[in-house]
Structure formats: structure tokens, C-alpha cells
Amino acid sequence: MQDNNSSTLIIGVGNEFRSDDRAGIVVSKKIKEKIGNKAKVIQHDGDGASLIDMWKNAGKVILVDAVSYGAVPGKIHFVDAARNQLPKEIKHHSSHLFGIADAVETSRVLKKLPPVFHIYGIEGKSFKNGTEMSREVINAVNRVVNKIINDLSK
């Protein structure tokens, strides 16, 4: 890993007790195990207001969350949020009135969005209470972890 990752922030969003909604949390934990202190890695519940403050000084943000776009479970959606507005159809499973999409677009308007901002959305299958993820989401989690680790090593 190179030192240029010191200003990299990796955020795994989710709820550990809502089945596939825990995907972002699991990704962040697996990455932390593999890279140690090469980047700041956190788990977050998705409250948009606190996210803005977290990423305001980062050079690069990688955010991973479970999503429900109506696609095949396990599909990985990628958005370069620094270059593109978030799709309108994003439906994050969040109990917050001000969520991730709101935080990203507010940061953009305020010109406080980090220069590199990647979002990985993993299409969930089940968001019911429980700690078991679906097979499709587990496979996607592993693919996203590998992709992020490869990107960080460049």
C-alpha cells in the first residue's frame, strides 16, 4: 500500500441486525482486517448530517451500502459521486430523514465534496430483522472488498 491512502476514508454503512443491510458494515470490517491503518475505515449507520462532517477533510472517500434499486440481488452498483449526481432512483434502506444521497448532494452544493468519492451499492435481497446475509450479497461483498483493496494498492 502506498502512503497516498492516508487521506482515504472508507465508510461501511448499514445495520448489523437487518440481514443484507449489513453488507457495507461487513465490507468495511474485511477491508480493515486486510489494510490495517493504511486508510481510515469506519462503520456508520447512514445518518447524513454526521457523514458530511466525517468526510469534509478526506482526499478520497469510498462508501459502501446496501441498496434496493429493484435489480438482481448481489448486483454491484457503482457511482463516481465526485463527477456525477446520484441517480434519482436510489432507495437506501435508512431510517434517517437526511440520508446518504442528501449528504452527498448537500456537500456538492456547498463545494465540500471530496475530490474522489466512490459509492458502491450492493443490491440487497432481504432487509428483515436478522444477521444472516443472502448468498448473493455475501458474494458481492467479497467482490467489492477485492475491488477496493486493488484500487487502494494502485
Image: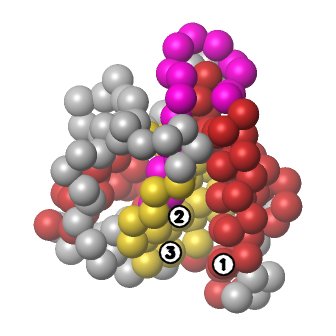
Neighbor class of circle 1 (other Cα within 10 Å; few <14, some 14-19, many 20+) is few
**Closer to us: mark 3 or mark 1?**
1
Residue 55, given in percent of the width and then of the height, sits at 43, 62
Residue beneath disc 1: 151
Q: Amino acid at mark 1?
A: Asp
Where residue 82 sits in the image (x, y, percent)? 33, 75
Depth check, front residue: 15 or 84 = 84
Q: Amino acid at mark 2?
A: Ile
Dot 1 or dot 2, earlier in sequence? 2
- Identify which residue is drawn at 81% across, 66% down: 35
Left or right: residue 127 versus residue 134 is left
For the record, the magenta segment spans 119-134
Closest to the observer: 34 or 122?
A: 122
User: Element under label 1?
Assistant: helix
Q: Is residue 47 visible?
A: no
Per the image, is 123 magenta?
A: yes
Displayed quadrant of residue 23: top right
| Residue 10 seen in render | yes
Q: Residue 36 lies in magenta, yes or no?
A: no
Q: Amino acid at mark 3?
A: Lys
Q: Quadrant of the C terminus?
A: bottom right
The Cα atoms of the two marked residues, 1 and 2, are separated by: 10 Å
Tell me the quarter of the image containing the N terminus.
Answer: bottom right
Mark 3 — residue? 60
Residue 62, disc: 2
122 to 117, vertically: above or below: above
Q: Are marks 1 and 2 in contact (CB under 8 Å)?
A: yes
Tell me which residue sits at (71%, 21%) in the image. 132
Residue at left offset 19%, top offset 50%? 88
